[in-house]
Image (cartoon, rainbow, N blue to C red):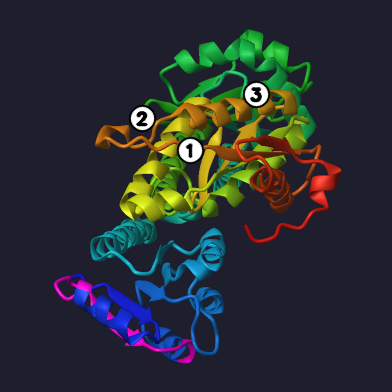
């Protein structure tokens, strides 16, 4: 039987503590209340809490520093800040650093219970999938293969085992993204990365034939062998292995034999077929794991990605842009005067506005672009393979789309908003993910401090600015 979720309340305000106990009295939670950071750390060290609810301003160590301490004890601690408007900026900063959410006092009891429920449900799903991951066990040489949840490690292990067991002279592992021209060599053995890239340049003319084959493993035909000799001059025989999960091709593995080694024998092929099954299972497990992991990267309100995911996607896209000598843009979007919406209509309506905002953004960008709710009413969009001229057009389309949209119209309201958008590009303005976000933020802030409802690109002058409190 699953134990009750444990919630730690850290607040020296007796009135708020009474509110919490009253709001949660009918819920199946185990609640512990402490008054300061020292007591909180003592409790957190001896008990594994599912959720911490804390004030930003505390006696002694403040709530932001306490949040950092919690993460040192157990990474990815779920923390909700309940604080006054005067401390909202600090709470938003904590949100960007990985806190789950923040609420402003006085807190609505229904909203309070809803945020807690969503947080605990998301954590439960993630933990269940983590438990599933830990249960995965395989034997012999493929045990490490199927217990690995990193695509590059899977490729390295699978290729190492295949080359060894099949007695190939060379091979390389190709990640496949369902686009006939979009391949990525994850690992190679017995052949240089440069020659593996040369193979890919000959790849497209054969890919359609290889995709049509029902078998998971098949030999090069005569034409392919002769063609690929241009790259691997001593080529005698080659086989292609498809790693396919359901109807989706996840990867292709190319194994080569030179004239000295001869053709692949039936015994070698049989060994390869066993390893293919284990590699396919590894990719199935990887899909399950990534699906569970993605839940931790989804903003619960808008269903966009959250700030945790932003840093991962920027790492990946900067590497891709550097490799293929392309560019990418970061758009930093901040709604103008959004606080008035919460003050006038309440946080529940404010939440609906933020959800609609996500829908407006979705209509303005491509499916391959990444949208993130960065915190509060701030959003970030990562535009891949996009130059500044195109990025400006997209930003202007977004600005106009927000300006023209009537929010919460279905409930008889007529809420009109505008937004400021800042752009920063790789490699024009920044070389790192944090610089990209910072410079786009600074460009956005020019609009916030002047006309509002504007789009600005990062410049040398903007990059040297320091942002003050808004």
Farthest-out residue, right = 460
- 440 or 269, nearer to the observer: 440
User: Could you say whether the residue bearing mark 1 is in a helix, strand or loop?
Assistant: loop
Image spot of residue 305 (x, y percent): 48, 45
**On-image quarter of the N terminus:** bottom left
The residues tagged by marks 2 and 1 sit, at their Cα atoms, a distance apart of: 45 Å
Which residue is rendered at x = 45% and y = 51% of the image?
340
The residues tagged by marks 3 and 2 sit, at their Cα atoms, a distance apart of: 39 Å
The residue mark sitting in front, 1 or 3, is 1
Q: Are marks 2 and 1 in contact (CB under 8 Å)?
A: no
Image spot of residue 12 (x, y percent): 40, 87
Q: Are marks 1 and 3 in contact (CB under 8 Å)?
A: no
Which residue is rendered at x = 54% and y = 65% of the image?
94
User: Could you say whether the residue bearing mark 2 is in a helix, strand or loop?
Assistant: loop
Q: Within 10 angstroms of label 3, few (less than 14), some, or many (20 or more) residues?
A: few
Instruction: Give the labeled residue for mark 3.
Output: 393
The residues tagged by marks 1 and 3 sit, at their Cα atoms, a distance apart of: 20 Å
Q: Is residue 111 magenta?
A: no
Instruction: Give the labeled residue for mark 1.
Output: 417
Magenta part of the protein: which range? 23-38
Image spot of residue 123 (x, y percent): 35, 61
Q: Within 10 angstroms of label 1, few (less than 14), some, or many (20 or more) residues?
A: many
For marks 2 and 1, the one nearer the N-term is 2
For marks 1 and 3, the one nearer the N-term is 3
């Amino acid at each position: 039987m699953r134990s009750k979720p444990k919630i730690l309340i850290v607040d020296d305000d007796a009135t708020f503590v009474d509110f919490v106990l009253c709001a949660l009295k009918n819920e199946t939670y185990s609640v512990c209340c402490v008054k300061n950071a020292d007591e909180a750390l003592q409790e957190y060290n001896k008990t594994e809490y599912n959720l911490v609810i804390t004030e930003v301003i505390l006696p002694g160590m403040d709530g932001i520093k306490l949040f950092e301490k919690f993460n040192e004890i157990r990474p990815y601690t779920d923390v909700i800040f309940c604080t006054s408007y005067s401390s909202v900026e600090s709470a938003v900063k904590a949100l960007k650093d990985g806190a789950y959410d923040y609420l402003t006092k006085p807190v609505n009891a229904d909203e309070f219970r809803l945020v807690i429920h969503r947080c605990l449900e998301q954590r439960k799903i993630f933990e269940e999938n983590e438990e599933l991951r830990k249960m995965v066990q395989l034997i012999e040489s493929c045990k490490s293969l199927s217990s690995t949840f990193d695509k590059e490690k899977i490729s390295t292990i699978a290729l190492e085992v295949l080359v060894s067991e099949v007695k190939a002279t060379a091979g390389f592992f190709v990640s496949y993204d369902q686009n006939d021209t979009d391949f990525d060599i994850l690992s190679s053995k017995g052949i240089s990365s440069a020659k593996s890239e040369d193979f890919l340049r000959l790849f497209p003319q054969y890919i359609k034939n290889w995709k049509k084959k029902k078998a998971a493993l098949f030999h090069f035909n005569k034409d392919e062998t002769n063609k690929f000799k241009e790259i691997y001059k001593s080529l005698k025989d080659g086989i292609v292995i498809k790693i396919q999960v359901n109807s989706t091709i996840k990867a292709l593995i190319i194994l080569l034999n030179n004239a000295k080694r001869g053709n692949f024998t039936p015994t070698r092929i049989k060994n390869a077929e066993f390893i293919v099954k284990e590699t396919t299972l590894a990719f199935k497990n990887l899909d399950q794991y990534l699906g569970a992991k993605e839940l931790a990267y989804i903003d619960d309100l808008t269903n966009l990605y959250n700030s945790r995911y932003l840093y991962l996607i920027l790492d990946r896209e900067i590497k891709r842009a550097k490799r293929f000598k392309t560019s990418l843009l970061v758009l930093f979007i901040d709604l103008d005067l959004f606080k008035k919406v919460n003050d006038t209509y309440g946080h529940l309506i404010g939440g609906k506005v933020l959800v609609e905002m996500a829908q407006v953004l979705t209509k303005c960008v491509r499916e391959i672009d990444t949208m993130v709710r960065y915190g509060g009413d701030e959003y970030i969009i990562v535009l891949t393979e996009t130059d500044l001229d195109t990025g400006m057009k997209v930003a202007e389309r977004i600005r106009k789309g927000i300006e023209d949209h009537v929010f919460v119209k279905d409930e008889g309201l007529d809420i009109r908003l505008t937004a400021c958008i800042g752009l920063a590009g790789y490699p024009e303005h920044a070389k790192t993910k944090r610089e990209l976000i910072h410079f786009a933020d600074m460009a956005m802030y020019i609009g916030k401090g002047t006309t509002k409802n504007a789009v600005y690109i990062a410049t040398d002058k903007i990059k040297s600015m320091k942002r003050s409190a808004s």
